[in-house]
Image (cartoon, helix red, strand yellow):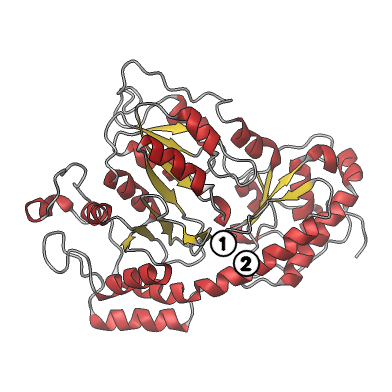
Amino acid sequence: MTNKPAILGGTPVRKAHFKSRKTIGEEEKKAVLEVMDSDTLSAFIGGPGKFFEGGKKVKEFEKLWATKYGFKHAISVNSWTSGLMIAVGAVGIEPGDEVICSPYTMSASATAAIFYGGIPVFADIDPNNCCLDPESIKNKITERTKAIIVVHLFGGTADMDAIMKIAQEKDIKVIEDAAQAPGVFYKGRPIGAIGDIGGFSLNFHKHIHTGEGGMIVTNNDELALRARLIRNHGENCMETIELDDLSNVIGGNYRLTELQSAIGIEQLKKLDGHLETRKSLAEYLTKELAKLEGVTPFFISENTTHAYYSYPFKYDKNKAKLSRSLFVKAVNAEFPVPKGYESVPLVEGYVKPLYYSTLYQKQIAIGKNGFPFSFNKHVTYNYDKGICPVAERMYEQEMVFSPIIREPHTIDDMKDLVKAIQKVLANASLIAKEFVNDSSLTIMDSLSTVNKTNIK
């Protein structure tokens, strides 16, 4: 291998594609066939009775998840987006209530509040973990704040002690969005139900999956009951339940099937192995990247574990002497054109701050009159650029992450990634001189990038 970067016509670090992730095996196939043979693909009934909470496999999956991590309740749902909506409804959000959200996450982590008339208020993120910054949360609380949706991003954890202290002092509910962080512990406690209610995603790109799906967890009996009511047409059960407050129990069909649950049972058995694999890959990357100028691995507290949904690090263009977009393009040029998102070596920026979107800029969500943003008549909600400077800086300048930190990859695969990064940084001045005009690279751009060495 020559030291000339592939983006300048040199020999790339690697010609072989990164391996595809394949987690469905014979165990899942056998489990699905057993359900098929039973002829009961879903056993839910949207009314009182023994099937209100689903069938055999749904209950088995929920019990397995709850028992494995010590949650009092686990409630399966057809997606984690549904799970977030259910959690918001369960904690009692009403029109005009403010819900503090992260701006640096998937859109549903904030829009879940809007479905109940809640108004997202964005707090900034901590630059050391990209999760909500407790100090910023404090500054965003008003008398209308009723909940905080905490996102455990990239598989790491937010500062839950500080956040829970704030919430308890102000009697604010805490919802944990742990979509990317199954099996993670914060100071010995499983995340997801350190707050009032939370949960995990089971869609295709997550550590374990059922195609689509999610799992709500809570240690609160009433919130669990409310979540189950919202999941499965709770309006049909109002006469049979003992709740002083029947608000928000009108439900929908947010149910997981017996087929998906059968897959989930087998997938959950594999989670510990996936987490160990990703931990070993991450530890290697952290050790090697810490030696390089211009890249800074995120610090992981000794009191927490990490699921490494992806591997994030901060990039400093001034120290590296190369713009972030060119750095990412040059590293990716050292590998074959990726076949899918999970095979992209590096991606820059993650997601744009949520308040940049038209939904918040025009404050149009439900109906044509600005609901719920217009509900509090004497309050003006500000979604202007600048309200969360750390999130904006991460998106525009500093954040780089790798999706390839996953099974079935090995340390040798990570060595190739490190070699590519070293090679690009060592030739930063040459690359910058050759490419005077460059633009930022989105996730989708990464999938279609064709470099000089890949043109046939």
> What residue sits 39% from the left and 74% below the top?
265
Few, some or many C-alpha atoms within 10 Å of disc 2 (few <14, some 14-19, many ≥20)?
Answer: many
Query: Rounded to the nearest whole Å, what is the CA distance between mark 1 and mark 2?
Result: 7 Å
Taking the image as drawn, is residue 315 in sight? yes
Residue 154 shown left or right of residue 177 in the figure: right
* Kind of residue indicated by mark 2: Arg
Residue 399 shown left or right of residue 167 in the figure: right
> What residue sits 90% from the left and 49% below the top?
427
Element type at marker 1? loop
Instruction: Give percent across and percent down for residue 147.
Output: 37, 39
> What residue sits 43% from the left and 29% below the top?
141
Indicate the quadrant where residue 388 lies.
top right
Q: Are marks 1 and 2 in contact (CB under 8 Å)?
A: yes
- Vertical comparison of 304 with 138: above or below: below
- Vertical comparison of 278 with 367: above or below: below
> What residue sits 78% from the left and 53% below the top?
331
Taking the image as drawn, is residue 123 in sight? no
Which of the marked residues, 1 or 2, is nearer the chain's N terminus? 2
Instruction: Give percent across and percent down for residue 22.
Output: 55, 73
Instruction: Give percent across and percent down for residue 366.
Output: 31, 32
Which of the numbered marks, if any, corresponds to residue 278?
A: 2
Residue 354 shown left or right of residue 229 in the figure: right
Element type at marker 2? helix
Instruction: Assign the N terminus to one quadrant of the image.
Output: bottom right
The residue identified by callout 1 is 307
Indicate the quadrant where residue 40 lies.
bottom left
Which of the numbered marks, if any, corresponds to residue 401?
A: none
* Kind of residue indicated by mark 1: Ala
